[in-house]
Image (cartoon, rainbow, N blue to C red):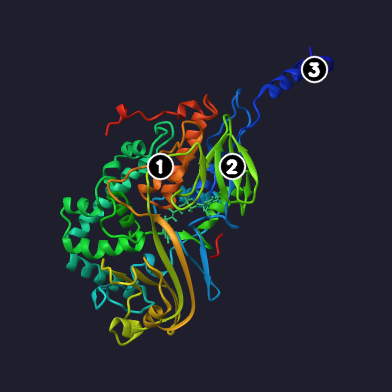
Amino acid sequence: MSSKPSFSFLILFIFSVLPLIFCISTNAPPPPTVCIVGSGIGGSSVAHFLRHYFHPTPTQPNPPIIKIFERRSIVGGRMGTVSIGGETFEAGASILHPKNYHALNYTKLLGLKIKPPPSSEDDDSMSFGIWDGKKFVFKTLQVDSKFPLVQKIVSFVNSFCLFFRYGFSLLKMNSFVERTVDSFLKYYESPETRPVFETVDEMLKWAGLYNLTTRTLQDELIDIKLSPLLIEELITVITRINYGQSVYISGLAGTVSLAGSEGGLWSIEGGNWQMAAGLINGSDVSLHLNEKIQSISYLGEYYELNSTKGNSYSCDVTVVATPLDEVNIQFTPSISIPERKLQHTHATFVRGLLNPAYFGLKAVAEIPELVGTLEDPDLPFSSISVLKQHDEKDATYKIFSREPMADALLDSIFSARLHTIRINWGAYPHYEAPEVFAPFILDSQHLYYVNACENAASTMETSAVAAENVARLILSRYFSEGSMDSSHLKSFSPAADTSHLDL
Ligand SMILES: Cc1cc2nc3c(=O)[nH]c(=O)nc-3n(C[C@H](O)[C@H](O)[C@H](O)COP(=O)(O)OP(=O)(O)OC[C@H]3O[C@@H](n4cnc5c(N)ncnc54)[C@H](O)[C@@H]3O)c2cc1C
């Protein structure tokens, strides 16, 4: 007997199965629409993780439609570049840590190229000094040599100088930072063992990081007996550079800021904003640029989003992926979140040459490539760093300050100034321990807030981690049974707690 089915059997089979397929497809609910406000690393990561974790099921066979709304003409948010004198530099978020695993995965997935950040942000051979407004209280050795051996010796001597000034406190500081980084690594555990968190508090408690948000960095460091000189100088310099704030910021934000001064830091060739652009391109998203959302209203079964252009969108799920502190979105019904101030950081880019006389020095070469400052209200800037030395008399610098840098001030700091670009960033939260967190779920329905997490620490990676959790929350709450493999969805229960922009 032939093993091939007969032609008439095939016809019979097709006609009996077709109506079934048709029936299933007409009974299936239409794909829900997830609307995301904001195209930074947070919003783009939500889209990416929704696609990554979604699995079709009989009740929800269709993946969601994803729409992203961005008020600007470009994606990336606080990841943006600036062009000065024909060269491009990071204007906002510039450095990534070697253990920022989501960012590393994005880089691989999107075929982006890693590069070390420019000059002083992560280079042992770069000179560094701490300026108190009158003098350098600390300065590393400065030897301009292209020979690796000489660079190694200089680096060794500089490590010795640091050790001589701050002693074993430096080692204690490193192990404190490493312990915190290790706790953070729990957020990369397999989704099978990692719960989905409804609140930031739960998320932090699960990794053992919550207590660090209840006290200041200074209190944490005094507890581990760090030398007051190290806290007053080097650690203050780092928190001022990374968060524009003093050692009174909360312990977790402070420790994240210290991790941002470790070795092996990196960024993306051509700009970190490409992570957001690549994730959006690869996630089948309909992107609405120049579309500023001004109101989000819950109308019973869906949300209506209205833009300043008069457009209106119906969404089954809405994700806010921007800090709500300085954007004026009207919510109906109103939502309640703790008041939070943003720290403004003024980033000023100058192509020109520093004036050695301002620093009481004779030659430009004597000025460290990274100048950090102490906590003194009279100091007009937090840091000045060389982004690129074009030649002896021409460099590009980045200045961070809490107030705008007036022309007269810049004219005293620089002997030559060819181009100047100023950006006022509503940069990150003004950290105040004990931190109080907004919820990830802003109503009891399907309105989510990625940036609730920024009170813990504001970085590209923490936004990606929060976004992953929000994507899993949406899949577990809206798509309920099994659109995500339900074995992946353990909800956290406290009882079980054992512990491209060109600006
Ligand atoms: C100067 C500076 C330096 C920094 N340095 C670092 C660093 O070195 N390393 C690091 O990891 N992090 C750094 N950060 C922090 C980092 O940039 C942020 O934590 C991260 O980029 C936040 O991403 P996000 O997507 O959550 O928010 P954002 O990047 O702010 O994205 C929000 C988006 O929403 C859009 N939007 C807002 N309102 C609306 C609306 N009504 N309708 C439509 N769209 C809207 C905005 O235009 C924006 O594009 C730095 C930040 C600044 C400002």
Is 55 situated above or below 370? above
- In the displayed image of the protein, which residue is found farthest to the top? 1
Q: CA distance from mark 3 to mark 2?
A: 44 Å
Q: Amino acid at mark 3?
A: Phe
Q: CA distance from mark 1 to mark 2?
A: 20 Å
From the top left corner, tell me how far across and down residue 406 is, in percent. Answer: 41, 75
Mark 1 vs ligand 1: CB below 8 Å: no
Mark 2 vs ligand 1: CB below 8 Å: no
Q: CA distance from mark 3 to mark 1?
A: 57 Å
Q: Which mark is residue 15?
A: 3
Mark closest to the chain's N terminus, 3 or 1 = 3
Q: Are marks 3 and 1 in contact (CB under 8 Å)?
A: no
Q: Nearer the viewer, mark 3 or mark 1?
A: 1
> Could you tell whether 341 is left or right of 135 in the image?
right
Q: Amino acid at mark 2?
A: Leu
Mark closest to the chain's N terminus, 1 or 2 = 2
Q: Amino acid at mark 1?
A: Ile
From the top left corner, tell me how far across and down residue 258 is, in percent. Answer: 30, 57
The front one of 200 and 139 is 200
Is 186 situated above or below 4? below
Q: Which residue is mark 1?
A: 337
**Residue in the image at 61% along x and 23% along y:** 58
Q: Which residue is mark 2?
A: 305
**Within the image, what quadrant is residue 416 found in?**
bottom left
